[in-house]
Image (cartoon, rainbow, N blue to C red):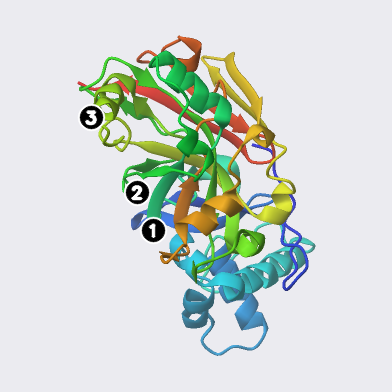
Amino acid sequence: MAWGHHAVAIGSVEIFMKLCTFEVATHLGRRQRLGAVTREGIVDLNFACAGYLLNQGETRPRELASVVLPDNMLEFLQGGRRSLSHATEALEWVQEKLKSEEILRGINDETLMYSPDQVRMLAPLPNPFSLRDFYAFEEHVKRGFEKRGEPMPQEWYELPVYYKGAQHNIIGTDQDVLWPAFTRRFDYELELAMVIGKQGRNVKAENAAEYIAGFTVMNDFSARDIQRKEMKVRLGPSKGKDWCTAIGPVLVTPDEIGDPYNLRMTACVNGELWSAENSGTIYWRFEQMIEFLSQDDTIYPGDLIGSGTVGGGCGLELDRWVRPGDLLELEIEKIGILRNRVIQGK
């Protein structure tokens, strides 16, 4: 993984950050923590915030840190700009301490920074509030209808359609994905995903960017034979999709991403390049998705929104199929590689 900078400013100025959820072994068992990926390592944001608050003279820094900068991604997102502001201050404090200390410890001797080999990276948002996956790349949609021998529906150009996935079946990078017993046609799908960072209702597309917390890579695994049957009865997809979705390796803030519609997207299977495209080929943009979702409905921090598969971004389009044991590596520029191995169930 490439370590990104983390210089952050609050307000109308830029916020550069790569956020993650990591797991660390302790004498009390494994713990999941919210982190920021920096050049120097992975910073535990909650513990760093407590240290910063103590340095500022707070009398109950641990208690306050648990409120203003929680130790998990979902609550962090719910904290909005306030949590981002405290993350900024905590990271700047860590940077200052690094000038004089090699090993950083928190106020109760907690570890403040880890090297990548000391932790296990999980899905950046292991428990999204919801999962909606759109159908936004025209090339992919056209090829799908061509393979079914059906014409491209005009309605697709009239509104951005999506399906609801199972937000409790989320995995992260370097986690195995089970080949489900009910399918013979396992497929990967290369997608750019976005996470909502602000509650809203009836949001207009021109204002929607301020509701985006960050971007990540998504692999929307598909059981194509089951999906085909579901779609024939004009309902779904459901079982063909919702058994597992992978996201990761990090959640990258919009300013760190820059233009989300000019990112190289690739998929490799066992080291061989299968898919290569650019996010700029998208037809329905995330701002339009947000406007559509929020029409007389509420979007919430932690909502996970997928772009749908980029053109040529799955085995179905290529007439190539994943097999048990295959290593899938999906990469999007400025975010990183989402890596999963397909395993056969016993």
286 or 341, which lies in front?
Answer: 286
Q: Residue at x 56, y 19 (%)?
A: 268
257 with respect to 181 (left or right): right
Is residue 127 something one can see in this rendering? no
Marks 1 & 3, CB-CB < 8 Å contact: no
Q: How many marks?
A: 3
Tell me which numbered mark, 2 or 1, is placed earlier along the sequence. 1
Q: Is label 1 or label 3 in front?
A: 3
Is residue 127 left or right of 110 when viewed as pictured? left
Residue placed at 57% from the left, 25% from the top?
139
Q: Is residue 321 visible?
A: yes
**Callout 1: helix, strand or loop?**
loop
Relative to 107, 281 lies left or right: right
Residue 257 image position (x, y, % from top left)? 70, 48
> Residue tagged by mark 2?
167
Disc 2 from disc 1: Cα separation: 7 Å
Quadrant (top left, top right, bottom left, bottom right) of the C terminus: top left
Lower position in the chain sequence, tag 3 or tag 2 = 2
Q: Residues within 10 Å of mark 2 (few under 14, many from 20)?
A: some
Residue under the image location 34 percent in, 58 percent down: 28
| Disc 1 residue crowd, few under 14, some 14–19, many 20+, Cα 10 Å | some
Q: Which mark is first along the chain, 3 or 1?
A: 1
Give the spatial CA distance, label 3 vs label 2. 24 Å
Furthest toward the top, the residue is 319
Q: Is disc 2 in contact with disc 1, using a CB cutoff of under 8 Å?
A: yes
To which residue does mark 1 refer?
A: 129
Q: Which residue is mark 3?
A: 233
